[in-house]
Amino acid sequence: MTLLYILLVIIFFIIIGGLRVVNQYERGVVLTLGRYTGTKNPGLTWILAMLGIQRMLKVDIRVKAVDVPDQEAITKDNISVRINAVIYYKVSDAAKAELEVENFAYAVSQLAQTTMRNTTGEVSLDELLANRDQISNRIQQIIDVASDPWGIKVLNVELKDILLPEDMKRTIAKQAEAERERRAVIIQAEGEVMAAENMAKAARILAESPGALHLRTLQSINDMSSDQSNTVVYLVPVEVLKAFDGFVKKEKS
């Protein structure tokens, strides 16, 4: 009976010692005598932990955000910039993440830094500033393909900041100012062209309509007479003087 009690106690401690709880956001990678033998799903599970026969490595499969620090890079047109980004990824295969790479989080971070520098060197500064989303997608695809053997799925890459040297900032500001001035000159010239076309059109209408020019003259005189501080000098056409001369001759006769 004593041996039976001892055996029951040993079995009890073996069972208790082998119980493991895997959280919903985890997966358990089981190694039996150092060899991978399966992956445990969330919930209460049991392994043969006595004498280290089996051990379980828990892997967090939640989405992780990795802040990639500032990286010094040179664009295709030989301009030095500093860029940083944030990467969102998750473990798609817990076994590969533990068995295929040592410290997958560190590996993903280093891969992201290298990929950012290489991708920046393939584009010009204007492309880097104008097509940030496209470049982010390209970095995401490269990292995703490279990390797939590790059981990592890269969900998104976002470029946060692109820092330029001070002299380059001043150059870009001058270029933007010159572009604004150029557009202002073009707009002003287009406005003058439109005004000239309208004036020419109005002149043709006045010339083609009998009496229109006289009405326009009277309207202009009326506008000037509204301000008493104005001094107006009228140049009377010769035809008007001849008309008055005709009236005078008629009265004399």
Image (tube, grey):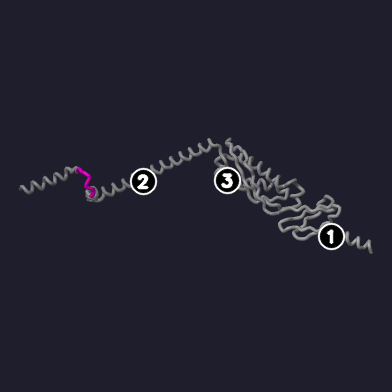
Outermost residue to the left: 253
The residue type indicated by label 1 comes to: Ile
Q: In this view, does 155 lie above or below 44?
A: above
| Residue 223 position within the rendered picture, expressed as x and y whole percent measured from the top left | 24, 49
| Alpha carbons under labels 3 and 1: distance apart | 56 Å
User: Mark 2 highlights which residue?
Assistant: 194
* Circle 1 Cα neighbour tier, 10 Å, few/some/many (<14 / 14–19 / ≥20): some
Query: Regarding mark 3 in the picture, which secondary structure is present there?
Result: helix
User: Mark 3 highlights which residue?
Assistant: 132
Look at the numbered discs 2 and 1 and tell me whether their residues touch, using CB distance below 8 Å: no
Q: Seen in the image, is 19 located left or right of residue 71?
A: right
| Residue 13 position within the rendered picture, expressed as x and y whole percent measured from the top left | 85, 59
Look at the numbered discs 3 and 2 and tell me whether their residues touch, using CB distance below 8 Å: no
Q: Which is more foreground, mark 3 or mark 2?
A: 3
Is residue 226 visible from the viewing direction of this image? yes
Along the polypeptide, which appears first: circle 3 or circle 1? Answer: 1
Along the polypeptide, which appears first: circle 3 or circle 2? Answer: 3
User: Mark 1 highlights which residue?
Assistant: 15
Residues in magenta, as a range:
226-233
Q: How many marks?
A: 3
Residue 52 part of the magenta-drawn span: no
Q: Seen in the image, is 176 located left or right of residue 26?
A: left
| Alpha carbons under labels 2 and 1: distance apart | 93 Å
Q: Which is more foreground, mark 2 or mark 1?
A: 1
The residue type indicated by label 2 comes to: Met
**Main structural element of the magenta stretch: helix, strand or loop?**
loop
Q: Seen in the image, is 3 located left or right of residue 86?
A: right
The residue type indicated by label 3 comes to: Arg
Residue drawn at x 79%, y 53% is 56
